[in-house]
Image: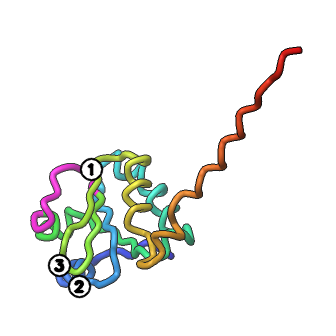
Amino acid sequence: MPVTAIEDFPGFMKAINSETPIIIDFWAPWCGPCRVISPIFEKFADKTENAALKFYKLDTDEIEQAMVESGVRVMPSFMVFQNGNKVGEVSGAQPKLLAELIAKHAKVPGSETAAAEPAAAPAPAPTQETSA
């Protein structure tokens, strides 16, 4: 699924009030780390296991009101919203933390047991050696 650009404040409000969880990449054209992590964010958006999460990007220079409303203090910032509530956040260009945030919120409701880590294989039974 491609990353959708949010073009204005009403579009921002509509996106964050979605019943479907969404993630927004708050970025700015002058931000070097934003340019570095943007392709990584786009790759996460294209992964089928993240299909339950909608991906957006928002230029904070163009929609400053959204940045203020969300409490963005660092560029880039990645925030997850659902039903108008911020439910997750990662600040800075940190691919590992971004991956964890996405994985946490990309789960399909009701699939928690299916998404759980596989059970560990049972340990082999100890063997007893007998001495002759």
Disc 1 designates what residue? 91
**Front position in the image: 74 or 81:** 81
- Location of residue 48 in the rendering, given as x and y in whole percent from the top left corner: 56, 72
Disc number placed over residue 14 in the picture, else none: 2
Give the residue type that dot 2 points to: Lys
Disc with the residue nearer the chain's start (2 vs 3): 3
Question: Secondary structure beneath disc 3?
Answer: helix
Going by the numbered disc 3, the residue's amino acid type is Phe
Label 1 or label 3, whichever comes before in sequence order: 3
Q: Which image quadrant: the C terminus?
A: top right
Q: Determine contact: label 1, label 2, CB under 8 Å.
A: no
Residue highlighted by disc 3: 9
Taking the magenta stretch, the answer to whether it contains residue 93 is no
Label for residue 24? none
Dot 2 crowding, Cα within 10 Å, few <14, some 14–19, many 20+: few
Front label number (2 vs 3): 2
SS for dot 1: strand
The boundaries of the magenta stretch are: 68-77
Question: By what rule are the colours in the image chosen?
Answer: rainbow
Image location (x, y in percent) of residue 108? 45, 76
Q: In which quarter of the image is residue 82?
A: bottom left
- Using residue 121 as the reference point, say whether residue 54 is left or right of it: left
